[in-house]
Image: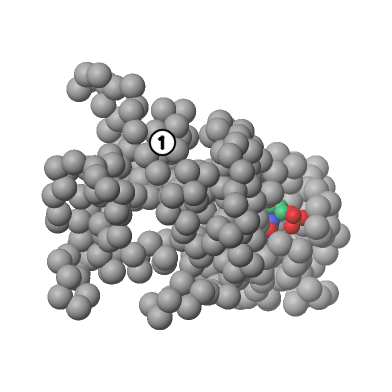
Amino acid sequence: MLRALELAATPGVPLGPNPRVGCVLLADDGSTIAEGHHRGAGTAHAEADALARAGGRARGATAVVTLEPCAHTGRTGPCAVALREAGVRRVVFAQADPNPVAAGGAQVLREAGIDVEQGLLEVQARELNRVWTFAQEHGRPFVTWKFATTLDGRSAAADGTSRWVSSRAARLDTHRLRALADTMLVGTGTVLVDDPALTVRDEHDRPLPHQPLRAVMGERDLPADRRVLDDAAETVHLRTRDPREALAALRERERQHVFLEGGPTLAAAFLTAGLVDEVVAYVAPMLLGAGLAAVGDLGITTIAAAFRPGVTDITVLDGIDGEQPNVRLTLV
Ligand code: AOF
Ligand code: ZN
């Protein structure tokens, strides 16, 4: 199973709506007959990939898979049936499939008299597809709220200038994190005031070849000259102010991970709706004393009601070119 997890994590698989899955076919003596992994939506599932490599040698084999073999016909055929037809005798999988459309493979296999064991290294398998698993189980994308702040909780000065609260190192780090999400979300206010490009760029400010979806939410119209409407990446305008509705619309587009970069109003709307799953805060050693708060009114009036996410990581981002270090806090 460790090998199957390794195969699942093979680098180079494009980010998409599907989980990363690995499969190893073993002979009775424990030797490997064939290996396989999934390479993204529309391509063969890990089991089908391994079976294709094994050919007739799959008969009597044990299939070790990181995810419960699927029972549905989606972009490809049901893997549980493929394993049964190939004569596989035993199936060991890590994570039960949380996708209600695809689940049920274990039962199909058991009904065919195949020995099925589940749960081996399940924690690792869930972690491998952390965001995908969350999106399946909650029926909505995972939301990471990212913001940059001064020591006194400001994201912009009183005159509106916000360049640059965070250091260049922190901004480069943000681009790295953006690239791990499939969607960036801001409000119409941010587009009207800041006119961000919302693209993922490298350290030379060149856009990466694969860009996340740019999503703008809010009822106001966007002037055609806004940078977010250029052709550097796909953009969708969600004409709602309701976070839940926005996430539902993004789910329809098979989005799993929203990187929320809006201003204080949008952040407050998501936080009060309980729709922030992870917080990434860049803290700059700077004081403004006045200016735009990093987050709007959360309706909290007493300490006992404070929103207290747990810290999972604290990283110091050393300054580049003589800049002061910034701190990145990750909380869930
Ligand atoms: C994968 N790769 O190796 C396995 C998956 O859209 P489809 O037809 O490719 O089906 C995707 C679903 O199939 C996915 O959500 C998961 O539930 C199941 N198993 N998916 O992408 C694989 N084994
Ligand atoms: Zn499958």
Amino acid carrying label 1: it is Thr
Q: Residue at x 52, y 53 (%)?
A: 184
Residue 285, position in %: x, y?
14, 56
**Toward the viewer: 49 or 273?**
273
For the N terminus, the image quarter is bottom right
Quick check: 22 above or below 148? Answer: below
Mark yes or no: residue 269 visible: yes
Q: How is the image coloured?
A: one colour
Mark yes or no: residue 278 visible: no
- Helix, strand or loop status at disc 1: helix
Residue 249, position in %: x, y?
66, 40
Q: How many marks?
A: 1
Residue 299, position in %: x, y?
33, 22
Extreme residue toward the bottom, this view: 204
**Toward the viewer: 77 or 109?**
77
Q: Residue at x 78, y 73 (%)?
A: 52
Q: Residue at x 26, y 26 (%)?
A: 306
Relative horizontal placement of residue 211, taking residue 164 as reference (left or right):
right
Q: Residue at x 70, y 44 (%)?
A: 252
- Can you identify the residue that label 1 sits on? 265
Relative horizontal placement of residue 87, taking residue 327 as reference (left or right):
right
Q: Is mark 1 within 8 Å of ligand 1?
A: no
Quarter of the image holding residue 82? bottom right
**Toward the viewer: 28 or 94?**
94
Quarter of the image holding residue 14? bottom right
For the C terminus, the image quarter is top left
Relative horizontal placement of residue 165, taking residue 90 as reference (left or right):
left
**Toward the viewer: 114 or 270?**
270
Q: Residues within 10 Å of mark 1 (few under 14, many from 20)?
A: some
Ligand 1, by image quadrant, is: bottom right
